[in-house]
Image: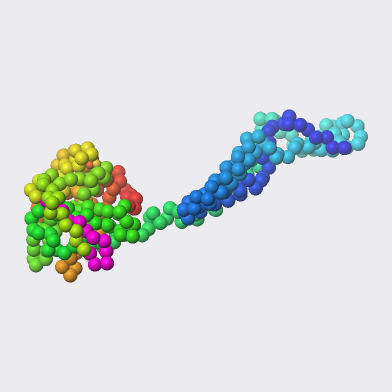
Amino acid sequence: MVETKGPTGPPHGPAPSLWPLGFAIGLTVALVGLVLGSWSTVAVGAVLLLAFGFVWARDVATGHGAPPVVDEPLAPGPESARHTVPLRSDRDADALPVMEDEEIETYPRSAFLSLSTLGLGGVITGIVAAPVTVFAVGPAFVGQGEEEVDIGPLDDYPEGNFIVATFLARPDEGEVSRRTAYVRNNGVVDGRPSLTILSNRCVHLGCPVQVNGLSLEGQKKTVEVPEGPTVELTPTEAASGFGCPCHGGQYDTEGNRTAGPPVRALDRFRYKIRDGRVILTSSYSVGEVDGQGAEAVIKAYDLAMPSVHVDGPEAILYPFEPPH
Ligand code: FES
């Protein structure tokens, strides 16, 4: 005859279960679906995630599945022969050393089981989800190098005035990669053409800056690019700088900030001349520009996000730059 005690003792946590494993599998399926762009897979994963998460949370909350507390079987004989664990003599000497209540540090089995279950679930989830997360997020941190972009013959950039060039930075990505650069031919210096090529991305929050001057839309032309999408060139006249329509940021003709909230000069493009054509190779950020045109001294830095200080004491607030 075995006597079973009801839930009169300390509450027990859940027994070890497979719910965390099911939860981890659901998470994995959902992440794989996200990576593959398969919404049906994401839905299956989400259902598994919710179902196993629900029963797991329910078990943890209610202690469902905890083993009942069982007294030792009653031994035949007089009442004094009954005992519970820990065994303690009712007679003369203690079977085990008897400690005062305040000396006993209790650590119930239920707490151990509960923490073990949660810990095991967390470990399994981490092991399963970590590779998927790396594959899902990793691509954002690699392969971010810029491609060379042909923006047309050098002859299409007459000396003196800025030309607005719009082009696809990554033709395989389509219109979403369309960029605009302000290109000014500074003439030939030391036998080499000198160009100032500014990005139109405002370094406050990224709005497109506009030329403070005349935009000669009627003279816009489309330039063919071998094995690539066409480039549109729009001449400008009497440009005195650039202005941002969003919050009033102002820049001079070298891209230096002159007013408003931007924190640095406009970003620039590196370039090379190949077979008489202007090729953009990469872009970079600029702290400040001293001088003009071909004589300008440019404080160049790795490309930074808008609003990021690239020099001065504030730059220490931006120790890392996410890929972009
Ligand atoms: S985005 Fe250009 S000033 Fe704010």
Could you tell me which residue is drawn at 53 percent across and 47 percent down? Answer: 43
Could you tell me which residue is drawn at 19 percent across and 58 percent down? Answer: 222
Residue 312, how many percent across, how many down? 22, 45
**Residue farthest along the bottom direction in this orientation:** 275
Could you say which quadrant of the image residue 113 lies in?
Answer: top right
For residue 106, side relative to residue 178 (left or right): right
**Residue farthest along the front direction in this orientation:** 218
Q: Is residue 226 magenta?
A: yes
Q: Which of 105 and 118 lies nearest the eye of the viewer?
A: 118
Residue 28 at least partly seen: no
Q: Is residue 199 magenta?
A: no
Q: Which of 192 and 150 lies nearest the eye of the viewer?
A: 150
On screen, residue 31 above or below 99 = below
Could you say which quadrant of the image residue 112 lies in?
Answer: top right
Residue 287, how many percent across, how many down? 20, 49
Instruction: Please name the predominant secondary structure of the magenta segment in the image.
Output: strand
Residue 153, how many percent across, how many down? 16, 64
Q: Which of 150 and 293 lies nearest the eye of the viewer?
A: 150
Colouring scheme, one of rainbow, by chain, secondary structure, one colour: rainbow
On screen, residue 137 above or below 75 = below
Could you say which quadrant of the image residue 177 lies in?
Answer: bottom left
Q: Which residues are magenta?
A: 225-236
